[in-house]
Image (tube, rainbow, N blue to C red):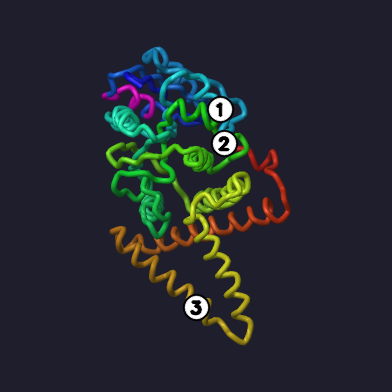
Amino acid sequence: MQNPSVSIVIPCYNEVNYIEKCIRSTQTQSFQEGQLDVIVVDGMSDDGTREVLLNLQEEFPNLQLVDNPERHTPKALNLGIEASSSDMAIILGAHAELEPSFVALNVEAMLEHEQAGCVGGMIINVYENETAEVIGKAMGSRFGVGNARFRTGGKKGYVDTVAFGAYRRTALNEIGLFDLDLVRNQDDEINFRLNKHGWKIWFDPKIRSKYYVRASYSKLFKQYKQYGYWKVYVNKKHQAVTSIRQMIPFFFVAFIALATIVAFTSLGPGPLILGLMLWFIGAMVATIASKASSRQYNGMLATFFILHTAYGLGYAQGIWHFLILGKTPSRTAKASTR
């Protein structure tokens, strides 16, 4: 793959405040060895985003606009990849901003690791309010999200998933594109398929992008409940648990439910109190390690609790719907905002 061509695919819907910064960061890349195209797949935005994109197209000839009237994220990703014939396809969020070396380092990593069907790096969060900062710190903790190196950092090497991955075209041709049944976890699922077919996923912390975080506790709860719910559907499709860390929040929620029931028996509330105390100690250690300020402690503890319980509840709901009742995702459940 000498002088590889690269396409950056950006699903987008109503991102007027972010899309220009995102696009301009793709145009300042140090990558000079091959062709670079940018494909924005827009869900028929009505907030001025399309006008911004049309103006940017006049400035940047390598910018392409593709319509996605279904506003379905996997569909958007597939439309963007299908609109390209590049050797590599990089998946990017409209809230992201690339460092100038981003594309070049992805290409370098792909060329160095022939077994890698996908490569990626670190997300550096840019917080737009204090709630977002607290949530971001919690999500950058191993206690919060496990060993997801693209959030927590770590040494370069093979991993089970990355964010804003750069995918090798030959690998996608072999395993297929993103699963249209999934609202969440579509990147985890395609990365699982890569590993299943013998490809690997390479992580390098030098590959960096910024991500502008707008956050609230209610949105975080909804998001992680969906992550847990859809993870069960992915597991069912592949007849496998795609990663061990996904089970921990479910066991945590199951323990709380069981210990609460036990509290009304002769055993009393001891197991529940002990379990919650151990969780609290772990959360406090992680909070202090994150270098959060003292005024952020309550927010950090709340975020950890939301991350664990929301994912666990969603996972339990997924077990009930997909495994016990044997349901498939409804049209409403598949609805997305892109």
For marks 2 and 1, give the CA distance. Answer: 8 Å
**Residue closest to the eye, 260 or 95:** 260
Which quadrant holds residue 156?
top left
Q: Is residue 267 left or right of residue 213?
A: right
Q: Considering the numbered disc 1 on the image, is that residue within a helix, a strand or a loop?
A: loop
- Which amino acid type corresponds to the residue marked 3 in the rendered image? Ile
- Which amino acid type corresponds to the residue marked 1 in the rendered image? Gly
For marks 3 and 2, give the CA distance. Answer: 40 Å
Q: Considering the numbered disc 3 on the image, is that residue within a helix, a strand or a loop?
A: helix
Question: Which numbered tag is attached to residue 148?
Answer: none
Q: Check disc 3 and report the residue beneath it.
A: 273
Are the residues flagged by discs 3 and 2 in contact, CB closer than 8 Å? no
Which quadrant holds residue 90?
top left
Q: Position of residue 170 (x, y in %)?
A: 46, 26
Which residue is rendered at x = 33% and y = 31% of the image?
106
Q: Check disc 2 and report the residue beneath it.
A: 337
Q: Which residues are magenta?
A: 22-30
Packing grade of label 2 (10 A; few <14, some 14-19, many >=20) is few
Q: Is residue 126 visible?
A: no
- Which amino acid type corresponds to the residue marked 2 in the rendered image? Thr
Are the residues flagged by discs 2 and 1 in contact, CB closer than 8 Å? yes
Q: Is residue 152 above or below residue 272?
A: above
Q: Is residue 11 above or below residue 63?
A: below
Q: Check disc 1 and report the residue beneath it.
A: 43
Residue pushed farthest front?
198
For marks 3 and 1, give the CA distance. Answer: 48 Å
